[in-house]
Image (spheres, rainbow, N blue to C red):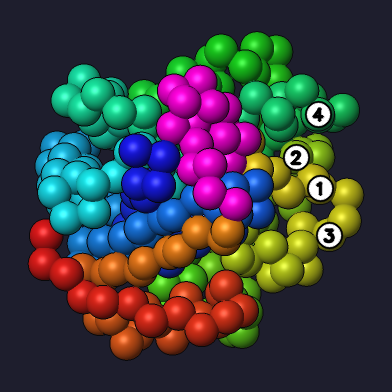
Amino acid sequence: MNSKPIGVFDSGVGGLSVFLELKKILPNENFVFLADQQYVPYGEKSKKELIKRGIKIADYLIKYHNIKMLVVACNTSTCNSIDDLRKKYSFPIVGTVPAIKPAAQKTKTRTVAIISTPSTSKSRVLRNLIRDNCQNLNVLNIGCKNLENVVEEGELNGPRVNKLLSKYLEKVRNSDADCLVLGCTHYPFLKKSIRKIVGSRIALIDSGKALAKRTQSLLRNHFIENSRKKNGETFYFTTGNSEKFSKVASRLLKYQVKAKKVKI
C-alpha cells in the first residue's frame, strides 16, 4: 500500500507548481501527474463539465495506476467538483483553494486582491472563503480570462503576458491592496512578470506549500506514507499533445520530462 503512487491532476501544466511543493517535502513518494490538456482551459468550463472530468480522471488513475490518494492541483476543479469526488471515493482527496485565509491574516491595509480563472472567481467556494475569512476587509476579486492559456504555451514573460497582466492588475496596482492571492496553479509560474507590474509592496501568496503540508499530514493520519527511503518516481501523462507538454513541463520544472498521451 505504501508504495502506491499519489495521483495529481490539473487542466494542464499549472498543477506542476503544486507538484514542485509536493516533491520538496515528500521526496520518497511516487507520483502520477496528469494534465487534462484536451479540455484546457478549465476556467471557462461549467460546473457539470468539471465534475464529469474529475470523475473520469479519478477512475482512470485508480484503474491504471492504483493510486492511494488524489491531489486536485487545480483551483477551478476543486471549487467545482471536490465535494462530488469526496462523496464517490474512499481514499483521501486534497484540493487546492485560493489562499484567502493567509492573505486575510497578513494584510495590514485591510485590502486583499485575488486573481483566478473566470470560473473560480464566480464559484460558491470562493464566495464562501471570502465571506468566512474577510469580514471587514476590502476584497478585489478578479477573474482573468486567457491567463492560464499563456502559461500552457510556456510563455512566462513577453508582450502577450505583459498585456494580459497589465489589464488584470491595473485595479490592484491602483488600490491599497498589500496582498495578492494567486488563485490558479498556473499563476505562480508568472511571479516574476507579476512582480514587475505590482512592485515590491504587494505580497504574492499561493497555496502550494500549504497543500503539500496538508498532503503530508493526511498520508501520516491514514498510515499510507511510503516508508522506502529512496527517491520516488514520477510518471507524466497528458490528454493533449505529449511532445508539447513535455517541452513546456521541462522548461517549468527545469529538468527533462517525457510524458505519454492518454485518452480519458
Q: Which mark is residue 59?
A: none
First along the sequence among labels 3 and 2:
2
State the image quarter where residue 140 is shown: top right
What residue did someone put label 3 on?
A: 199
SS type, badge 2: strand
Disc 3/disc 2 C-alpha distance (Å): 12 Å
Range of magenta residues: 211-229
State the image quarter where residue 246 is shown: bottom left
Left or right, 55 with respect to 11, comes to left
What residue did someone put label 1 on?
A: 202
Q: Position of residue 25 (x, y in %)?
A: 65, 47
Circles 4 and 2: CB atoms closer than 8 Å = yes
Query: Mark 3 is on which residue type?
Result: Gly
SS type, badge 1: loop
Query: Mark 1 is on which residue type?
Result: Ile
**Is residue 124 depicted above or below 116 in this figure?**
above
Left or right, 80 with respect to 172, comes to left
Circles 3 and 1: CB atoms closer than 8 Å = yes
Circles 3 and 4: CB atoms closer than 8 Å = no
Q: Residue 118 lies in magenta, yes or no?
A: no
Q: Residue at x 35, y 85 (%)?
A: 244
